[in-house]
Amino acid sequence: MLTLVKTIFIVMAILLSFESDAQIYQHTQRFGPELNYRSSRIEIPHSQSTVIKNEAFLGLAVGYFVVDNLDIGLGLKLYSTRIKFEQDFQTDLSFIIGPYGTYMIRLSDVIYVPVSVSFGYKGLKSSLEYEHGNELSGGIGLEYILDNKLGLRVTLNRKIGLSSKTTPTISDAFTNFMISVGGNVYIYNN
């Protein structure tokens, strides 16, 4: 993970040598893929057991700048979860879909701080159960926009949510942090 952060820092430092004025004005459209990874280790109280959970997310967001610097849109994330409990493994595929809003704070002509909030519906179907729920996410990051049209974004997100499982019927509240790396394409329409 640290190597990824160093690589992103070096790439952004190199890109800072280019100068352009970003296109994040009203009527601009934004298309952007996103990649997230999260790993957690849960120690079960009063037991020697440990649960290891690895999740990889691939997302796509489509948005529109309703005013300068304010992007409103829809996001879709597909993710794979692998859970290891003692010697057993379970792998599931899931999705999250919902609206988002991002305000871009300008630091320079090419560097912006995106502050975002999103709401999503989560659905998961595995061989053992069906899970669904809602989640709310807020994040802050750094984006470098190259050549008025391409952006590289790194974001720290905080997610909270509630999910329900059908087998057995239980509800579960969750909260976590996640670092995401993504790119954006900006298309300006007069």
Image (tube, helix red, strand yellow):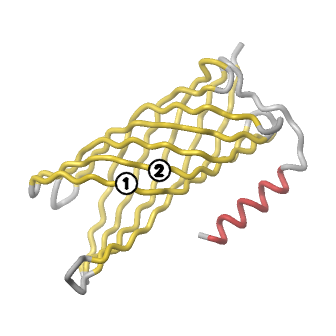
Q: Which of 174 and 167 is in front in this view?
A: 174
Q: Report the number of numbered marks.
A: 2
- Residue at the extreme left: 168
The disc labelled 2 sits on which kind of residue?
Arg
Q: Do the residues labelled 1 and 2 touch (CB within 8 Å)?
A: yes
Q: In this view, does 43 lie to the left or right of 66?
A: left
Label 2: element kind? strand
Instruction: Report whether 117 appears left or right of 184.
Output: left
Residue 93: percent from left, percent from top: 32, 55
Disc 1 is placed on an element classified as strand
Residue under circle 1?
175
Residue at which label 2 appears: 158
The correct choice, above or below, for 95 with respect to 73 in the image is below
Q: Residue at x 61, y 26 (%)?
A: 70
Of all residues, the one furthest to the top in this rendering is 190
Q: x, y percentage for residue 22?
A: 78, 32
Q: Nearer the viewer, residue 53 or 129?
A: 53
Q: Which residue lies furthest to the bottom in this view?
A: 48
Q: How crowded is mark 1: few (under 14 residues within 10 Å), some or many (20 or more)?
A: few
80 versus 47 height, above or below: above
Q: Which of marks 1 and 2 is nearer the N terminus?
A: 2
- Where in the figure is residue 169, as x and y percent of width and height? 10, 53
Residue at image point 83% right, 31% down: 21
Q: In which quarter of the image is the C terminus?
A: top right
Residue 165 in the image: state x and y as whole percent: 17, 52
In-image side of 154 versus 119 (left or right): right
Q: In which quarter of the image is the N terminus?
A: bottom right
Q: Kindly identify the amino acid type of the residue bearing the numbered disc 1.
A: Thr
* Alpha carbon separation for disc pair 1 and 2: 7 Å
Few, some or many residues within 10 Å of mark 2 (<14, 14–19, 20+)? some
Residue at left offset 43%, top offset 31%? 99
